[in-house]
Structure formats: C-alpha cells, structure tokens
Image (cartoon, rainbow, N blue to C red):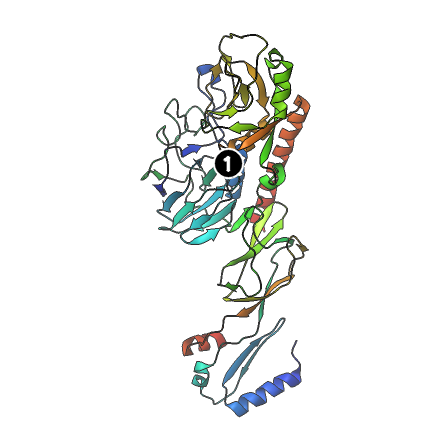
Amino acid sequence: MIAINDIRQIARQMQNSGLGKIEINGKDFSLRLRCEGKDFSDIQNQPRSQTPFTVKAAVKGRFWASHPMQEKSALARGAQVKAGDCLGFLQTGDLMTPIRSPQEGEIRVLNVANGEQVGRGRVLFTLQPAAQTVRHEEAEHALY
Amino acid sequence: MIEIEKTTALTSVQDLGRSGCLNYGVGRAGAMDPLALQLGNLLLGNAPGAAAVEIPLFPFRVRFLEDCAFAVSGNDGDILLDDEVLPPWWVAQARAGQTLTVNASRYSARAYLHLPGGVDVPEVLGSRSTQLRGAFGGFEGRGLQKGDRLRAAEPARAMKTDVGIASPWLRFADLSSQVQPVRVLPAGEHLAYTADSRARFWQQDWKITPQSNRYGYRLEGEPLVARQTMEMRSHGIVPGVIQVPHNGQPIIQMSDAQPSGGYPKFATVIEADLWLLGQIPPGRRIRFIECNFEQAREAWLAQQAYLQQVDKQIKQLRQA
C-alpha cells in the first residue's frame, strides 16, 4: 500500500512541477492523480512509469523455467521480453500452462526456483517495464 | 482447411488402425505412436482415435487456409506458427494464412498434427488410416504431397487453446538413457534357438537399421542361431511380433505389418511399449527386457489409466 502522506507529497510535487496527471502502479496498489487546469501535453515527452510489475501464477502447479522436454536455456535476470512471451510453464498434474508476460520489459527478479511447487497468485517474476518515450496519444491512453 | 507446403511422401493420415480385417488379408496400419495420437486428440477435445497427420521427416510445413485450432503431439522439436515458437505437446489457434512448421525432435521420430474433430477423410473398413500397401484409406490411399489440402471434421469448433500436456516420455520413458528398454514376451519359437542366442537376445543392444519403416524395423546385432533349420508355413502375425529370418537378424513387425508371415517368432513387443518403439529413430539402439503376461497387462492398464487421467484433467480445464 501507499501512505496517505506520500500521496499528499506527490500531489504537492505535481502542483509545483505543473504535471497534469500521474499514474503509479505498485505491487498491490494503483494510484491515479489529476491536477486541474494543467495542459496534459506537458507529459508528452516524459518516460512511461518505470515502476516494476510482477507476473503471478495463474494456477497452482510446479514451475518450469523451460519446457522439461526441451533443453532451452531459461530466462535469466536481465533478459528482455515482449508482451505475450512465454516466461516458463506451470505443470498441474499432466497439464502445462504457459506463463506469459503481460507487457514488454526486462526480467529483474526470478522469484521461484525451477521445479518448485507454487500456489495460485504466487509472484514468479518481477520485471522492469521497457524504457521508452511515449507519444502524446499513448500517454493519454495510459493515463485515462 | 490446411494445405501441405513441405513434406515427404512418408507423411500419412493415420488413426488407431483398421482392426478386425486381418482375415481379409488387410493389415492394421494406424499410428506408429498411438499414445501421442490419442493425447493430441484429447488436447483438442476430439475422440481419442480421431485421424491425424503422422509426420516422420522434417521440416514439415502447412498453411492454414482458414482460422482453425490445432495440436501437435509426439515430438519435442521446434514448432513454429509463423515465427512464434510453440511448446511441444500443445494446442494453439491458427488464423487464416498462418504457416505451421514442425522441426525434428531430439528424442522421438514422429510428430502428429491434429485438427478439431480429426482430419476429414472417408472411413474405409472402419478406419481412416492410410493403408499404403493396398493404396486405400487415409488421403486418397497415399502419402501426402505438397499442395494437398486437408479438411478438419469440425473446423469452426471453438476451444481453449494455448495449453499443453507434459510429455508421456517424462512418465513412461527414460530420457537419460541412450538405449531405450522395450519390454517383450517370449513367443512361439523362442525355445527353438540356442541357449547362447536366447541369452544374447536380452544382453546385447540392438541397433535399429536404416532399413526400418512403418512396415517393420530391421535390427542389427550378434545374430540369433536356431538349434536346427526351421521351415514354417505362413501364419498370422501382428504388429509387435519379432521374427528371425535365416540371417539371424531380427525384424520387428510395425504398424504396416502384413497380416501373415513364415519366419519363426522369437518374441513379441508388449502393446504398452509399441508407441515408444514407434518413436525410436533408425540408428538408435534398443534393449529387450523380458516380461510375463501379467506384467504386460499391468503396463497396458497403467497406460489406459494415464490416458483417462489426462482426459479428465483436460475436461476439467475446459469447464473452468
């Protein structure tokens, strides 16, 4: 969670800097702030939020960094992935479910060991969103 | 509908085979890996014995002419939908115009491409398997060629895709072993061979020679010697029977075995291990493990229980 004092602090900084909108995504919260009367185009060339995001286990099962039938190297820290890329598998009984990245980014932390049994909702990967300068329309889309 | 873009003539449409026709002189045919055939069908929600495309040589490539789900089973090589890599033993959704490429495996010799409802070819004598010797069944009674178009029986059926199963190799085979063990029962003329030969049969590794195909596997090793020359009348044989011709080098009858033969029968591969044998490529070696009827039956029941278990899990997943 985020402390209310931190939100006040962010709001003050927004006023001082003239930033119109901000969105912060943490591990278990999402915060959107809007400052009235400002021109949103200020943020046109601001980088997108750099807050890390996590990929969680959608089902319970055994985690495999790569398919047990294939000798492929598992994704390591620093690996770049695209949205939809397969980060590994969860084996539940005989079924294999892919673990897919929801967005582009770089793997920062692998929170699970190969072959480990994990529960549903367990954080498997922490990724840093890809650094990119967003265009105005995208920024608007991202913030609304 | 799919169109074959790259294949060899050894690719064919197969189901579980044409049983009950041996008395007409019609061999069984059917998938060399019946376990993969059934598992791939279960992934798509098909009847376990629905017809699929059996692919023995790679790369194999098809183009989807319409949106269609599909599954690839049997192999662990790279499978590409356009340029997206798919995991092995997987069900996925293709869109019209996409190309599927199946590449060679590390462990297994054959891959199966499954379509919703099975590959839509006419049933002949109770089966959709290609009978290559008789030139009937399957797709026009022959192996597939570039430009052939195959239809799915239920092309528009929607289903959960992007899910797979752990390979049966992880459960039933020893991936760390260079020489796969194959369980066999001693057969009719077993005791007609010298004690040395019988011992050697179990002790040595047998090489699967390049003269091996869907009809049979010719093995190479120290020859088996009969105690005296045997001349036998032709009699009924089935896939799995290990015959010994005069040169002493065994032949294992496989899916396209003819229904009769006259060579002495040394042993028979148990039905539960035929899928594994069907997946071992020429050049590799196998070792025979003696078992009894009760063990063979237990192995068969364990495999059937496994298939039912996988079916149940996939059905639960679809309901979720």
Question: Could you tell me the amino acid type at mark 1?
Answer: Leu
| Whole-percent x, y for residue A86 in the image | 52, 57
| Whole-percent x, y for residue B241 in the image | 54, 20
Residue at the image point whose x is 49% and y is 60% from the top: A84
Q: Is residue A67 above or below residue A4?
A: above
Residue at the image point whose x is 41% and y is 25% from the top: B131
| Whole-percent x, y for residue A7 in the image | 62, 84
- Name the side, left or right, on which A61 lies relative to B259: right
Residue B119 visible at all:
yes
- Element type at mark 1: helix
Camera-nearest residue between B211 and A136? B211
Residue at the image point whose x is 43% and y is 29% from the top: B129
Q: Is residue A23 above or below residue B276?
A: below
Residue A144 visible at all:
no
**Chain under callout 1:** B
The residue positioned farthest toward the left in the image shown: B147
Camera-nearest residue between A7 and B233? B233
Q: Which residue is mark 1?
A: B37
Q: Quadrant of residue B275?
A: top right
- Tally the marks: 1
Q: Quadrant of residue B5?
A: top left
Q: Is residue A57 above or below residue B111?
A: below
